[in-house]
Image (tube, rainbow, N blue to C red):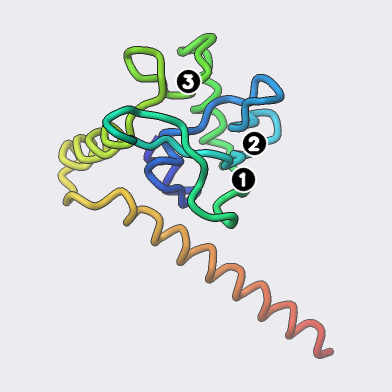
Amino acid sequence: MAVDERKAGERRGGASGPSPATNACSAGIDLERGDLRVRRQVSRINGEVVEAPLKTKNAYRILPLAEDTVGVLKEQRRKVGNSPWVFPSPNGGPISPDSVLHMLHRVLKRAGLPKVRFHDLRHPYVKHTTKNIFLQKQKSQAINRF
């Protein structure tokens, strides 16, 4: 899950929230098209893990998924069967955003890497994406000069 988040620049609640697009009312991952439709997040409200609307109108978006990520998600889909969640909790509901953070910290510790906030994983994605958009715009302007 953290690998996918790093590639898509997703927030903690969004990373724990996607469910597969199996019916019209379920926004989530489209494995055939290879994209993630961000339409909701998972939050802890009054101690209960619930689906919640996103914080801003710009948070609603469609993100492309890398081919290797789609492969991992297809395998995960086979593992969870009929669950509406790609990564269900032991009780079958959504994973708590707190659990996602704890999983990240365990993976980092095993890899001998320093602890980071989940949100910090967004920065390389944003930097890389912004740089690519800027370079594309520069190329486009340079081509149009001739």
* Amino acid residing under circle 1: Pro
Residue behind mark 3: 76
Do the CB atoms of the residues marked 1 and 2 lie less than 8 Å apart?
Answer: yes
Residue furthest to the bottom: 145
* Amino acid residing under circle 2: Gly
**Quadrant in which the C terminus appears:** bottom right
Q: Quadrant of residue 48?
A: top left
Query: On screen, 87 above or below 10?
Result: above
Label placed on residue 64 = 1
Of 130 and 84, nearer the camera is 84
Disc 2 or 3, which lies upstream in sequence? 2
Q: Quadrant of residue 97?
A: top left
Point 16% across, 51% down: residue: 114
Of 95 and 128, nearer the camera is 95
Q: Position of residue 118 (x, y in %)?
A: 31, 48
Inter-mark Cα distance, 1 to 2: 6 Å
What SS does tag 3 mark? helix
**Quadrant in which the N terminus appears:** top left
Q: Position of residue 24 (x, y in %)?
A: 71, 24
Disc 1 or 2, which lies upstream in sequence? 2
What SS does tag 2 mark? loop
Circle 3: is it few (<14), some (14-19), or many (20+) Cα within 10 Å? Answer: few
Label placed on residue 34 = 2
Inter-mark Cα distance, 1 to 3: 18 Å
Q: Position of residue 3 (x, y in %)?
A: 40, 41
Of 26 and 5, nearer the camera is 26
Disc 1 or 3, which lies upstream in sequence? 1
Point 16% across, 40% down: residue: 109
Query: On screen, 98 above or below 79?
Result: below
Residue 98 as seen in the image, left or right of residue 72: left
Residue furthest to the front: 46
